[in-house]
Amino acid sequence: MARDSAAAMDQGWAHDGVSKWLAYHRANGELIGRVGLSGSTVDGRDCLEVGWAVRQQFWGRVRNRDRAGRA
C-alpha cells in the first residue's frame, strides 16, 4: 500500500509537474501526513487541487499556515 502511494505520487510529478509531500514531525521525525497539489480535469479544463491528509493523532495540532507556507 505505501509503495503504491509512493508510486502514484511519483507519477504525479512526471505527469503533472506537481504532487504530494510527506510531512514529518520536526522534533522526532514521525510521519504526520501528506500535503500538496494534484492535477485534475474539471469541466474539460486542467486544474490544480490542494489536498492533505493528517494522521488522526495530529488533528488540531498542525496549523494550516504551516502547510500552506511550505507548499
Image (tube, rainbow, N blue to C red):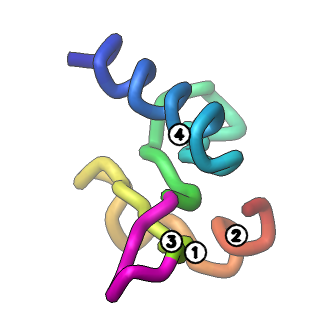
Q: Secondary structure at mark 2?
A: helix
Contact flag, marks 2 and 1 (Cβ < 8 Å): yes
Residue labelled with disc 4: 12
Q: Secondary structure at mark 4?
A: helix
Decide: is 56 above or below 20: below
Residue labelled with disc 2: 66
- Which residue lies at the image location 29% right of the left edge and 18% below the top edge? 4
Q: Secondary structure at mark 3?
A: strand
Q: Is residue 55 left or right of residue 31?
A: left
Marked residue nearer the N-terminal end (2 or 4): 4
The one nearer the camera, 30 or 9, is 9
Which part of the image, by quadrant, shows the C terminus?
bottom right
Label 1: how many Cα within 10 Å (few below 14, some 14–19, many 20+): few
Contact flag, marks 2 and 4 (Cβ < 8 Å): no
Of badges 1 and 3, the one in the foreground is 3
Q: Is residue 49 left or right of residue 57?
A: right
The one nearer the camera, 54 or 40, is 40
Residue labelled with disc 3: 50
Marked residue nearer the N-terminal end (1 or 3): 3
Numbered range of the magenta stretch: 39-45
Could you tell me how far apart the alpha carbons at marks 2 and 1 are, in whole angstroms? 5 Å
Residue labelled with disc 1: 63
Marked residue nearer the N-terminal end (4 or 1): 4
Identity, as a three-letter code, of the amino acid under mark 1: Arg
Contact flag, marks 1 and 3 (Cβ < 8 Å): no
Could you tell me how far apart the alpha carbons at marks 2 and 4 are, in whole angstroms? 23 Å
